[in-house]
Image (spheres, coloured by chain):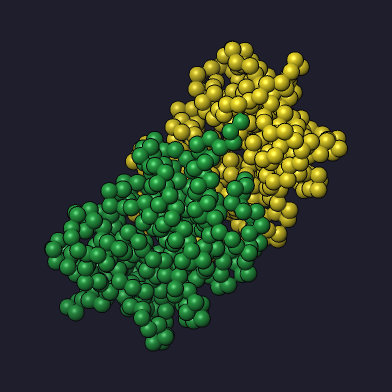
Chain colours: A yellow, B green
């Protein structure tokens, strides 16, 4: 009897594509579950899903980029804990239009992203889906000192590790099929988790009051850092904007800072620190300051305005 | 500014439903990732996805049962490694017809299943889906001694922990809206992972040559245990069949053993042991024996026939 019906042959191909050696592996990919020796410190786990036509469209996303991004958004959560990734599991519900070469590109993109950050794909599931492609990835990592969203004090500064609103700029350029905007498109299609910052953050761990990744836009995410008794002043003229964002804002007639306030999926880190430690974080961008009065305010040279209405980043 | 747009309020409700205390928790549900102290032994991780209209239909699956089953199928993989579950993450891509009370029932079913087996729901994702409901669960567990699919020797006996084909019997009864078949329907809608057997298996670990859970039908799964140089004789008249299966087989005019050979989703355990140790495993059912000649044979009182054609359990 033939041991490899079509589905198993496909799983074999995927296994060949993603499998790596790792000294912690006890039972490798291909059994009921993956078994590994624990890493020093604490274990860190996260899981993030992407759904076709909700989070991405296949007309502007290549299989390779999608594979890389589905893992990257999880690695970003690992970075936001000050952790290191080790193992990923990926489940994919695939529609009929997804063929073998598409899958091969997808797992190649994901494997390359995994390799770049010392992570290994060790399991998951492959299922059919009648309508939409769905990708769900979980990542297992470890850390010695977890950074959380708790710990902001009134007076703390809010910083970001890079420009905000760039991914949304890229999404608009992709959706509207605009030429140019290459940096923005790249940020949207191939975001990089800020795992490069983990070592330096761990070295200054006592100065980090709170840390998270920015995936849903500055306002939405910063609100999760803000204690109930505190407020936040955002310095509108100080927000780190890429030139692609400035150009897009001009074209669309939207104030450029709106891209940073509401645009999601940048996967930069947001951090709260004491003003006394500002000089220790060169390369980070000052976004605002937590205050002892509730409310979120946008401060300009000519005054401040309260932000009272919540906007999801997909709808602004 | 209101801190809880609709989506966050929903996530808060889910958190309230699933959150538990656990002495291993370092950073609880609600941050970028979940952080925990390692358990003794090795770590065990698995991930399994269920897609609407592929793995289940909502006309016969209640939200509660679906929540329980989506976790159970993963707990079954944990049991198949001889491990104990600790933490689960659940991602759900929900369609518009899924309302808040449905979600509440779903997470209640999952929480009760988790509580029953000492597992805790600690993360995951909630997304919109334009067409089909998709559920993906990952589980983290631990074990001292992993049981794998490798290690079968020629001459080993193949045993199961319970009846096979019962879930498929239930599926047929549900699909065809038949009265009765209550045990079969229950097996399909609310399968139980055989974590109850883990302690006794670990106590006899040196006698267990290979272990896996039976999710895709006996033939499909047993083939994964069978080394390339071995074959398998299945004792047709010996297969453990529930009376609901015998009744359904009669009704449909299909030999009852076909339900066990090809029917999936029973989530019983399959084990290979030496014939010398057969007496040590009371309560287990003898299914067949591995031989030193490749090929899968069905043996009857009046001879044997080779099974040459592969059938997926959904298509038989």
In the image: residue B6, left or right of residue A225: left
Q: Visible in this render: residue A33?
A: yes
Residue A111 in the image: state x and y as whole percent: 57, 45
Which quadrant of the view contains residue B216?
A: bottom left
In the image: residue A291, left or right of residue A175: right
Q: Check the picture and name the quadrant holding the N terminus of chain B.
A: top right
| Residue at screen point 62% across, 12% down | A250
Which quadrant of the view contains residue B227?
A: bottom left
| Residue at screen point 37% across, 68% down | B268
Residue A307 in the image: state x and y as whole percent: 63, 25
Q: Is residue B31 above or below residue A188?
A: below
Q: Visible in this render: residue A36?
A: no
| Residue at screen point 69% across, 46% down | A150
In the image: residue B211, left or right of residue A45: left
Q: Is residue A49 above or below residue B83?
A: above
Q: Check the picture and name the quadrant holding the C terminus of chain B.
A: bottom left
Residue B36 in the image: state x and y as whole percent: 64, 58
| Residue at screen point 76% across, 30% down | A286
How many numbered circles are shown? 0
Say which of A109 and A243 sits in front.
A243
Residue A134 in the image: state x and y as whole percent: 44, 41
């Amino acid at each position: 009897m033939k041991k490899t019906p079509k589905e198993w042959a496909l799983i074999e191909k995927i296994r060949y594509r993603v499998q790596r050696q790792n000294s912690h592996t006890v039972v490798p990919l291909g059994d009921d579950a993956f078994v590994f020796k624990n890493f020093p410190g604490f274990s860190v786990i996260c899981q993030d899903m992407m759904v076709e036509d909700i989070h991405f469209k296949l007309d502007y996303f290549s299989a390779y980029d999608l594979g890389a991004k589905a893992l990257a958004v999880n690695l970003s959560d690992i970075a936001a804990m000050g952790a290191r990734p080790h193992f990923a599991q990926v489940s994919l519900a695939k529609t009929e239009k997804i063929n073998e070469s598409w899958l091969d590109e997808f797992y190649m993109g994901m494997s390359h992203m995994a390799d770049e950050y010392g992570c290994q794909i060790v399991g998951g599931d492959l299922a059919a889906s009648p309508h939409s492609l769905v990708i769900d990835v979980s990542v297992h990592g470890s850390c010695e000192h977890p950074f959380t969203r708790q710990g902001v004090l009134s007076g703390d500064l809010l910083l970001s590790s890079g420009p905000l609103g760039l991914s949304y700029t890229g999404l608009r350029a992709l959706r509207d099929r605009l030429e140019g905007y290459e940096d923005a498109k790249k940020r949207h299609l191939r975001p990089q988790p800020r795992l490069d910052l983990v070592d330096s953050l761990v070295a200054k761990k006592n100065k980090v009051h709170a840390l998270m990744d920015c995936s849903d836009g500055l306002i939405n995410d910063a609100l999760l850092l803000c204690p109930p008794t505190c407020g936040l002043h955002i310095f509108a003229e100080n927000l780190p904007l890429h030139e692609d964002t400035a150009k897009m804002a001009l074209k669309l007639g939207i104030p450029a800072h709106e891209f940073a306030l509401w645009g999601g999926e940048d996967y930069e880190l947001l951090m709260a620190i004491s003003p006394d430690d500002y000089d220790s974080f060169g390369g980070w961008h000052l976004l605002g300051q937590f205050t002892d009065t509730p409310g979120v305010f946008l401060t300009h040279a000519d005054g401040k305005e309260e932000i009272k209405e919540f906007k999801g980043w997909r709808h602004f």
